[in-house]
Image: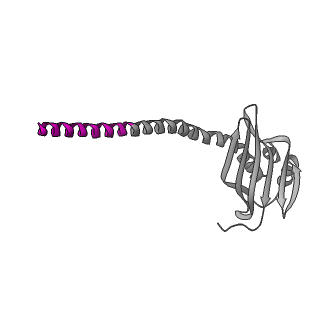
Amino acid sequence: MDRLQTLSSRCTAGYEAWSQGRIANMHRLAKQFVLFFGVIPATIIALAQPADEQAVLAPIQAMFDGMSKRDALAIKAPTLPGGMMVLMRDGKPEQMTFETFAERVSKPGKTRIEERIHSPLVRIDNNLAVVWARFDFLVDGKVDHCGTDLFNMVRVDGKWIIASVADTGTKTCPAK
């Protein structure tokens, strides 16, 4: 009889250990399920973000392309009429309208100019966006000055345009 009780208690203990392990596995699977289905929507949002960011960045690139061509109309095309620029030079702000900037940059010249931004940080909220990015301004393929660009963007009639620009500019640029 003792042997039967011992065998019975071992079976009961084995069953309890097995069922606790199974419950622990079920909890682990439930956590993985929640994590997996919580990550999928976040991943879908993250995948959708680059297209939105590209739409915000497109008018900035269009302005840069216009600058490279020294084309006043192309520089102004992706901007909000009456919009302003603030260029910080040697700690002093230089303010001008997009129109004035376009006239200045579009003057005929023999040098090739190009502005490039790096790793832009884009934030979007409905019809408002901001872009913060390091930039290099090249003259004849060599960095002339660098700094940080800050673009305020607005979406008008479904199209992103540049509302204002602020930038810092320094001749002390890291070697590339």
Which residue is nearer to you in this view: 33 or 26? 26
Residue visible at 48% across and 39% down in the picture: 35
Task: Report the coloring of the rendering.
Answer: one colour
Residue visible at 88% across and 53% down in the picture: 95
Q: Taking 156 as reference, is 116 above or below it?
A: below
Asked if the stretch drawn in magenta spans residue 167, the answer is no
Residue 113 in view here: no
x%, y% of residue 16? 28, 37
Main SS of residues in magenta: helix
x%, y% of residue 140? 73, 63
Stretch of the chain drawn in magenta:
1-26
The quadrant in which the N terminus is found is top left
Q: Which residue lies furthest to the front in this view?
A: 2
x%, y% of residue 167? 79, 55
Residue visible at 84% across and 53% down in the picture: 86
Asked if the stretch drawn in magenta spans residue 20, the answer is yes
Which residue is nearer to you in this view: 94 or 40? 40
Which residue is nearer to you in this view: 153 or 23? 23
x%, y% of residue 169? 78, 61
Please identify the quarter of the rendering in which residue 25 is found. Answer: top left
The mark tally for this picture is: 0
Q: Taking 43 as reference, is 143 above or below it?
A: below
Compared across the picture, whether 22 is left or right of 90 comes to left
The quadrant in which the C terminus is found is bottom right
Q: Residue furthest top?
A: 157
Residue 175 in view here: yes
Which residue is nearer to you in this view: 153 or 3? 3
Please identify the quarter of the rendering in which residue 160 is found. Answer: top right
